[in-house]
């Protein structure tokens, strides 16, 4: 008997779905359109976090390790061995580590005959190792990167030799490339860390360790707290304009997209509810007949809820697929790079669409209170 009831249930459900194909198509279009917009916005929201993290990391380090009490403009240094205490693996990826030593030195360009005093930044690794290919057999200690402003003042050209002196110590290098960032990098010359240590007569000493830590602002703060425990003799300084700026922008984008998704789902629910109201009016006679031959109110309600869930499932499947494709184009328009499809968005969108369809079937609950006698007498 249960199998017979189940079979009858599905036969009636197929008949209900095919009774009014026009209205069925309208509800599917409404649910599909809502699912498409929802999937597109949710995929953009998930992808925005990764995009923002990538864009902000392109600005450079977001955490600094400096000697305690250092002003970054003074001469304080610490042992280079501290770098071995820095964890390079975090849940969000790998930490990029760069150590540097800063000093003031005299710079002369034999080719132009000009000279002056400027900031020398010795870094490991050197920021432009790829430029070595243009200088043949030159090693990393023989090349340097000149800031745009320094290069103009000294008359330095590509491959020009620079002679750096500090006291009685002398180093020379060839300009591999120029750097223009609009920041302090434009007014200094970057050389290899070992060459800078020889020039400053500070073997195995550095001024700062620069870290590019991936992850959310909360994950970065947790990493900083752990790092401070590992290196108590140094001071850990987050570059807050990066971490806080990233958090603010993401929170605003996430809030806007979440609110838009809520509005889209609400409008979809209203459209489906309007169609369901008409369905409820048309099906009074069908419900009266089912109840007259012994159909329980609970089963009648379950029948119409199953119909709404199937409509939501079908609309969600089609709309979510279209929405994820749509998000790829929207991501390219917003971020300049196509959004990466996130598989988690698909089941979430289908589930939300089914929930909207079931909640929109509220007008059909009125059918459960219909009395067969009233329907047949034309009073309902």
Image (spheres, rainbow, N blue to C red):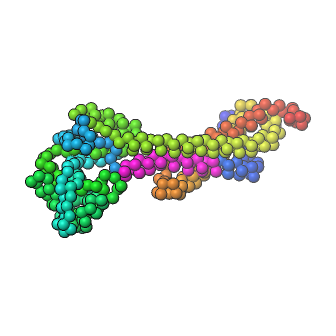
Quadrant of the rendering where the C terminus is positioned: top right
Q: Would you say residue 47 sits in the magenta stretch? A: yes
At 82% from the left and 36% from the top, the residue drawn is 288
Which residue appears at 28% of the width and 55% of the height? 187
**Residue 366: percent from left, percent from top:** 77, 34
State the image coordinates of residue 370 (x, y, percent, origin top left).
Answer: 81, 32
- Which quadrant is home to the N terminus? top right
Query: Does residue 259 appear in the picture of this structure?
Result: yes
> Residue at the left extreme?
168
Residue 75: x and y in percent read 20, 43
Which quadrant holds residue 224? top left
Residue 48 x/y as whole percent: 47, 48
Nearest the eye: 4 or 80: 80
Read off the magenta span: 32-59
Left or right: residue 310 compared with residue 209: right
Task: State left or right for residue 40 relative to residue 267.
Answer: left
Q: Nearer the viewer, residue 264 or 252?
A: 252
């Amino acid at each position: 008997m249960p199998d017979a009831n189940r079979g009858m249930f599905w036969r009636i459900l197929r008949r209900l779905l095919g009774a009014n194909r026009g209205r069925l198509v309208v509800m599917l279009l409404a649910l599909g359109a809502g699912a498409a917009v929802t999937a597109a916005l949710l995929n953009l929201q998930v992808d925005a976090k990764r995009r923002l993290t990538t864009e902000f990391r392109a600005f450079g380090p977001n955490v600094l390790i400096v000697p305690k009490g250092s002003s970054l403009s003074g001469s304080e240094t610490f042992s280079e061995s501290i770098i071995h205490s820095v964890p390079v693996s975090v849940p969000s990826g790998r930490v990029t580590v760069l150590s540097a030593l800063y000093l003031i030195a005299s710079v002369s360009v034999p080719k132009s005959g000009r000279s002056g005093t400027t900031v020398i930044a010795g870094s490991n690794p050197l920021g432009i190792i790829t430029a070595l290919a243009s200088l043949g057999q030159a090693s990393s200690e023989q090349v340097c990167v000149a800031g745009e402003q320094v290069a103009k003042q000294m008359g330095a050209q590509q491959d020009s030799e620079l002679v750096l002196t500090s006291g009685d110590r002398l180093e020379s290098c060839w300009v591999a490339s120029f750097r223009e960032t609009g920041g302090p990098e434009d007014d200094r010359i970057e050389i290899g860390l070992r060459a800078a240590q020889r020039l400053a007569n500070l073997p195995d000493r550095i001024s700062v360790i620069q870290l590019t830590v991936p992850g959310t602002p909360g994950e970065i703060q947790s990493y900083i707290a752990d790092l401070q425990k590992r290196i108590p003799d140094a001071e850990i300084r987050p570059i807050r304009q990066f971490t806080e700026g990233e958090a603010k922008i993401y929170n605003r984008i996430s809030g806007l997209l979440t609110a838009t998704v809520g509005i889209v789902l609400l409008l979809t629910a209203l459209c489906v509810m309007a169609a369901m109201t008409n369905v409820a009016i048309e099906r009074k006679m069908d419900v009266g007949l089912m109840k007259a031959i012994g159909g329980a109110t609970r089963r009648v309600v379950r029948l119409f809820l199953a119909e709404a869930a199937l409509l939501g499932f079908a609309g969600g499947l089609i709309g979510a697929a279209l929405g994820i494709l749509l998000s790829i184009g929207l991501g390219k328009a917003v971020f300049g790079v196509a959004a990466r499809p996130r598989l988690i968005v698909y089941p979430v969108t289908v589930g939300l669409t089914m929930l909207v369809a079931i909640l929109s079937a509220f007008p059909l609950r009125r059918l459960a209170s219909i009395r067969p006698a009233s329907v047949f007498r034309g009073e309902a």
